[in-house]
Image (cartoon, rainbow, N blue to C red):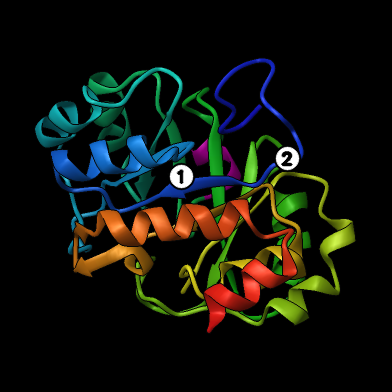
Amino acid sequence: MLFSKSAADDTQRVRVKICGITREDDVVAAVDAGADAVGFICYAGSPRFVSPSRLMSLASLVPPSVTKVLLFVNPKAEEVREYLSFVPDATLQFHGNESRAFCDQFHVRYIKAVSIDKPERLTEAQNDYPMAAALLADAAGVTRGGTGTSFDWQAVASVRSRITKPLIVAGGLTAENVCEAIRTLSPWAVDVASGVESAVGVKDPAKITAFMEAVNNAGDVAACEEARD
């Protein structure tokens, strides 16, 4: 299963992906905190962009039990293949307007990001990308990921029962609000980037730890209230 650390991994727990990793120290911090996946942005328009050679150095620190995710925004096929040549066991994440045929051609597990300008975008994407391993719901906008902006969770909750693929929730998540997101949308996983940073592209170990604790305590109402306060 997606983001599972072993075949016996608990299917009921909410997984965590730490995205926008740019430094070796941040790989170690995410792994040590218990992240299920780490994301590397392979889109030159992002301040968290990593080159193929830089990716190889960072990915070498990720243990087999943690999923490596490569995020692209409307790439050329040869760009994707170049990155995969450095990290062939990675999961892909397409965050732009890529077609089903484009995403499917690599024969690699992939996540399709969906910009939520209306709840129905998720059900449309589920039909349009049947081979996607998961759908990632993110805030709509020109900038792709890492903006610190969330979408209307309550609106998406109205279509949640129709989403049969694993749902990953992203967009503006922090230790203070991730409990509410989990309780509202019951996602398979949550995805955080700017919410665990001290500066753009610089992860904060204390914020990562607090985020992980908030996710793990999402079923505890008192703990959620304490995190929000």
For the magenta stretch, what is the residue range? 99-103
Give x and y (percent) for residue 60: 21, 22
Identify which residue is drawn at 66% across, 15% down.
7
Identify which residue is drawn at 27% across, 33% down.
78
The rendered magenta stretch, by its main secondary structure, is classed as helix
Q: Nearer the viewer, residue 66 or 165?
A: 66
On screen, residue 8 above or below 167: above
The secondary structure type at the circle numbered 2 is: loop
Give x and y (percent) for residue 213: 51, 54
Q: Is residue 102 magenta?
A: yes
Name the quadrant containing residue 161.
bottom right
Q: Answer yes or no: is residue 96 visible.
A: no
Identify which residue is drawn at 69% across, 71% down.
222
Give x and y (percent) for residue 124: 75, 61
Q: Which residue corresponds to mark 2?
A: 130
Q: Is residue 134 magenta?
A: no
Confirm or deny contact between disc 1 and disc 2 (CB under 8 A). Answer: no
Q: Nearer the viewer, mark 1 or mark 2?
A: 1
Give amino acid for label 2.
Pro
Q: Nearer the viewer, residue 69 or 118?
A: 69
Identify which residue is drawn at 24% across, 59% down.
204
Q: Answer yes or no: is residue 32 visible.
A: yes
On screen, residue 17 above or below 122: above
On screen, residue 188 above or below 199: above
Q: Residues within 10 Å of mark 1 (few under 14, many from 20)?
A: many
Give x and y (percent) for residue 115: 56, 69
Q: Which residue corresponds to mark 1?
A: 93
Give amino acid for label 1.
Gln
What is the distance, in whole Å, between disc 1 and disc 2 at their CAs? 15 Å
